[in-house]
Image (cartoon, grey):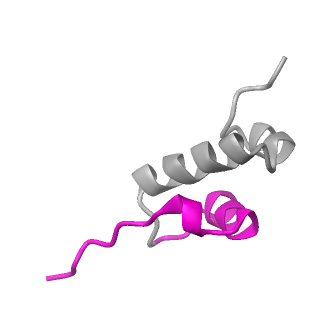
Amino acid sequence: MQEAQTFNMHEFSSRKLWEMVSTEEKDTSPEELVAAVRELAHRRHYLTELEQIGKLKPQN
């Protein structure tokens, strides 16, 4: 049985979070992807890129 890992997105660099979101790694759950997008948006990093790949609604 595989043990579930919980990720603290605050511990990852913005670059690693962007890699997780943009490549949608096989071992990353949908919940983790959402958390990574939220963390990047909170940090205000990669906003344009997130919008371009459809992970974030365009900012006005």
Quarter placement of the C terminus: top right
Which quarter of the image is occupied by the N terminus?
A: bottom left
- With respect to residue 44, does 6 lie above or below? below
From the viewer's perspective, tell me whether residue 48 is left or right of residue 24: right
Q: Is residue 24 left or right of residue 32?
A: right
For the record, the magenta segment spans 1-26
Asked whether, in this view, residue 40 is left or right of residue 9, the answer is right
Q: Along the horizontal axis of the image, is 30 left or right of 25?
A: left
Residue occupying the point 47% across, 63% down: 8
Q: Which residue is most to the top? A: 60
Q: Nearer the viewer, residue 56 or 39?
A: 39
Residue 24 rendering spot, x and y as whole percentages: 58, 62
Report the number of discs: 0
Q: Residue 9: x, y in percent?
A: 53, 60
- The residue drawn where x is 44% and y is 72% is 27
Q: Is residue 59 magenta?
A: no
Which quadrant of the view contains residue 3?
A: bottom left
Quadrant in which residue 17 is drawn? bottom right
Tell me which residue sits at (68%, 49%) in the image. 40
Q: Position of residue 36 (x, y in %)?
A: 57, 54
Q: Quadrant of residue 20?
A: bottom right
Image height of 2 relative to 38, above or below: below
Place of residue 32 in the rendered image (x, y in percent of width and height, measured from the top left): 46, 56
Where 54 falls versus 26 (above or below)? above
Residue at horizontal 57%, vertical 68%? 11
